[in-house]
Image: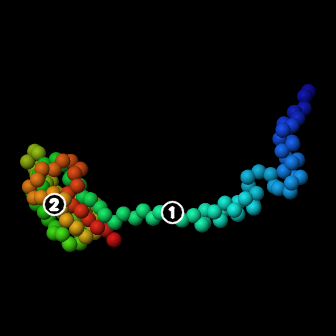
Amino acid sequence: MSTATPNPGMRRLQRRSTRQGRATGPASPRRRLHLDLAFETVVGEDLSVIERLVVSPCPGALRVREVSPGQYVTEGDVVARVVGTDGQTVTVHTPFAGTVMGYLLPHGSPVRMREPLVWLRTE
């Protein structure tokens, strides 16, 4: 029957750290306090984007502008209508609430799927 002896290198490490008066392992209260303070004092960037784009749901041509620049729209409002390549009119709903800053394409211009149509500013 053999008895397992602990790793001699680990024994030396434990003896040395207790001799120097430090707690063993990374969970020492002193180290934890230092890390907590370090995280509290770090200041990062604030990424708040207030500009939004409403895109075309299908390829076709921009035919009807439902809102004018400066008008406030809520989520789900119709902002434009696009005549698709199959001839059907598709309404463009805004997924955001905000002030309409303008249209990015002139009336009647061809549009691709997911091409930006309306520029909104949320607040």
Q: SS class of the residue under badge 1? A: loop
Q: Nearer the viewer, residue 82 or 3?
A: 82
Say which residue appears at 65% left-offset and 65% top-offset.
37
Q: Nearer the viewer, residue 54 or 89?
A: 54
Residue 104 placement: quadrant: bottom left
Question: Could you say where residue 19 lies in the image, as x and y percent from the top left?
Answer: 89, 52
User: Which residue is disc 1 drawn over?
Assistant: 44
Q: Nearer the viewer, residue 17 or 64?
A: 17
User: Which residue is disc 2 drawn over?
Assistant: 80
Q: Residues within 10 Å of mark 2 (few under 14, many from 20)?
A: many
Give yes or no for contact between labels 2 and 1 (Cβ–Cβ under 8 Å): no
Vertical arrangement, residue 116 with respect to residue 4, above or below: below
Say which residue appears at 88% left-offset and 47% top-offset.
15
Question: Could you say where residue 14 lies in the image, as x and y percent from the top left?
Answer: 85, 47
Viewport quadrant of the N terminus: top right
Q: How many marks?
A: 2
What is the CA distance from the residue labelled 2 to the residue labelled 1?
38 Å
Identify residue type, mark 2: Ala
Which of labels 2 and 1 is toward the front? 1
Residue 50 placement: quadrant: bottom left
Residue 76 placement: quadrant: bottom left
Question: Could you say where residue 54 lies in the image, as x and y percent from the top left?
Answer: 24, 58
Say which residue appears at 16% left-offset and 60% top-offset.
80
Q: How is the image coloured?
A: rainbow
Q: Nearer the viewer, residue 69 or 41?
A: 41
Q: Does residue 89 appear in this view?
A: no
Q: Residues within 10 Å of mark 1 (few under 14, many from 20)?
A: few
Say which residue appears at 16% left-offset and 67% top-offset.
67
Identify residue type, mark 1: Gly
